Image: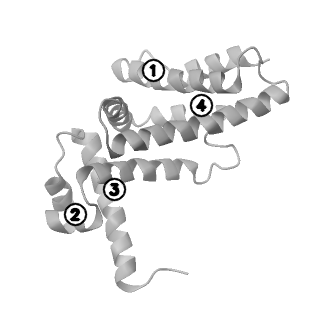
Amino acid sequence: MQPRGSYAKGLAKREEILDAALECFVDKGYDRTSVREIARAVGLSQAGLLHHFPNKESLFLEVLRRRDEQSVSGNEERGVHSVHGLIDAVERNSSQAGLVGLYVVMSAESAHTEGLAREFFRGRYAWVLDDIAADVERMQREGQMISRLTAREIASLLVAAADGLQIQWLLDPEGVDMTERMRALVATFES
């Protein structure tokens, strides 16, 4: 059943705001983007935008949440947060330098502050690690992956490598092939 009337318009405006916010955050960075600028981009006043999102941090986190949902949508069969799903995500990220840079900065900054961003990233890492560890455990049971390390240890190393490769790639996009390096790392854990 499709939403109707003003509710549907509100949802459409919310999506428009998220699109504009993503574009602004990627182009200028989180710190150099103002709520007023995003509001102007979608034809709202600052107060109008704040009707949909209480503050800039919650808007940013909703942009990241939506990006995660879009990554999951349509990829359930392979498992977005699986060993091979992680490789797929790294490959997708190689076409999104601005968003990757923003994600790296915000996740690092959230480690030093209390608030919504820290909780978002803490929860996201727990979710990703749990899912990848479950996939590694399955692969270990099926004899596809080594058992010298626990599934959680392997998952943690894979996520850490993916994050570190993103930084290396941002610094040297021509010299770092994140996808190939992730494939090579996964191969070292395969039986």
- Say what amino acid the circle numbered 3 marks: Asp
- Say what amino acid the circle numbered 4 marks: Ile
Give the mark nearer the N terminus: 2 vs 4: 2
Give the mark nearer the N terminus: 3 vs 4: 3
Up/down of 36 relative to 163, above or below: below
> For mark 1, what is the residue?
164
- CA distance for labels 4 and 1: 14 Å
Give the mark nearer the N terminus: 2 vs 1: 2
Image quadrant of residue 54?
bottom left
> For mark 4, what is the residue?
87
> For mark 2, what is the residue?
50
- CA distance for labels 3 and 4: 25 Å
Give the mark nearer the N terminus: 4 vs 1: 4
- Residue 155 at x, y percent in the picture: 62, 27
Label 4 secondary element: helix
Circles 2 and 3 in contact, beta carbons < 8 Å: no
Q: Residue at x 75, y 19 (%)?
A: 190
Q: Residue at x 38, y 79 (%)?
A: 7
**Residue count near mark 1 (Cα–Cα under 10 Å), binned few <14, some 14–19, many ≥20:** few
Q: Return the residue found at the far bottom.
A: 5
Query: Which of the two marks, 2 or 1, is nearer to us in this view?
Result: 2
